[in-house]
Amino acid sequence: MVFVDEIQVHIRAGHGGHGVVRWRHEKGKDKAGAAGGNGGWGGDVLVRGVRNLNILSNYRHIKEFAAKNGGSGLKNSMHGKAGQDLTIDFPIGSSIKNLTTGKVVAILEDGQIIKILEGGRGGLGNEHFKASTNVRPMQSTLGKPGEEATFWVELALVADAGLIGLPNAGKSSLLNALTNATSKVGSYQFTTLEPHLGPLFGFVLADIPGLITGASKGKGLGYKFLRHITRTSLLLHCISAENENVASVYKTVRDELAAYNLELLKKPEIVILTKTDTVSADDVKIKKKALEVVADDVLTVSVHDLDAIKKLSQNIVKRLEGAKKNLKSKK
């Protein structure tokens, strides 16, 4: 299945049903009085948060959603049937922008429901217009159209920690080692073309697509990378020990974060020197010291070193638990 993290779709709430002109019929007395019912309300449009990250893929060929229209009024003063509401499921982390009004709603919780469009009011039947001065009203009104708009839906993952870095930084292999996830691994750029998730002791780690210089301007995978780290509470900045100048690589990624959103620089970060098995022990020490000049928290790891993986796992969980406690204390 193709991973889709942004779509544009037109959505329409239901139209209100029409009011009608009807007459009450009694034995021996035809047209005893106005009895035309009002039209039913059109259905509303609701969005609901779900944990299925791939659900946008189901919508990629759908250009329009529509709630049901209300039914027309009936005889004997009976109102028309209300149109059925339409509920559209979107992944947790979705930002849904009404391109007509500019209003944006965010889906952040499983099962969260938000109304985005209101159905049209039903029209009035002739009974509504009955009065002492209008005993045989012929008036009725049409139902009102439901609200409609084109929406831009954009998914930004809701993960506790995001593995970031240039292509080939070892993010996918590290995610697999930490969480038993099955993120695709390869030795060429942009092996990861979509985010992958893995569980770590109740937390969620995301392997985010690698970026290149100019990603903040849309180059490479551009916004696909940067958007997905906006809601993470911890950055796991992976830098391959295969790089000659690891400090320069670190600066490249940080510069792209700053160009996209300065707030990203404020996120807690662990810098991880990966692929330490590909260079000598002396090189590992030299490159770790070079990173410690520009970053506060630097760890080294090889996915083939189970002790290093365990130590890193414990460190990540400790940091995430601390961030969770701080968040609760602020509420």
Image (cartoon, rainbow, N blue to C red):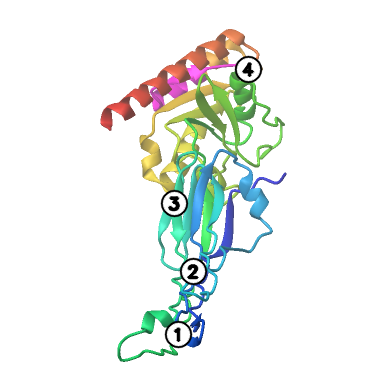
Residue 32: give its label.
Answer: 1
Q: Is residue 192 left or right of residue 121?
A: right
Numbered disc in front, either 1 or 3 = 1
Give me the C-alpha separation between circle 2 and circle 3: 22 Å
Give neighbour class at mark 4: few <14, some 14-19, many 20+ (Cα, 10 Å).
some
Q: Which stretch did the figure color magenta?
A: 287-303
Q: Position of residue 251 (x, y in %)?
A: 46, 36
Decide which of tag 4 and tag 1 comes sooner along the chain: 1
Between disc 2 and disc 1, the foreground one is 1
User: Closer to the N terminus: mark 2 or mark 3?
Assistant: 2
Residue 246 position, x and y percent, is 52, 28
Closer to viewer: mark 4 or mark 2:
2
What mark, if any, has residue 114 been given in the picture?
Answer: 3
Q: Which residue is mark 4?
A: 303
The quadrant in which the C terminus is found is: top left
Q: CA distance from mark 4 to mark 1?
A: 87 Å
Query: How far from the left and from the top, in percent, is residue 319?
Result: 41, 21
Mark 2 surroundings: few (<14), some (14-19) or many (≥20) residues within 10 A: many
Residue at horizontal 35 percent and vertical 90 percent from the top: 134
Residue drawn at (62%, 46%), measured in percent from left and top?
Answer: 55
Going from the N terminus, do you reach mark 4 or mark 3 first? 3
The amino acid type found where label 3 is placed reads: Ile
Tell me how far mark 4 sits from mark 3, CA to CA: 43 Å
Whether residue 115 appears in magenta in the rendering, the answer is no
Q: Are marks 2 and 3 in contact (CB under 8 Å)?
A: no
Q: Circles 2 and 1: CB distance less than 8 Å? A: no
Q: Which residue is mark 2?
A: 40
Residue 111 location (% of width, % of height): 49, 41
Specify few, some or many for label 1: CA neighbours under 10 Å numbering under 14, 14-19, or 20 or more: some
Question: Where is 48 relative to 169, above or below?
Answer: below
Tell me the distance, in whole angstroms, between the alpha carbons under discs 4 and 2.
63 Å
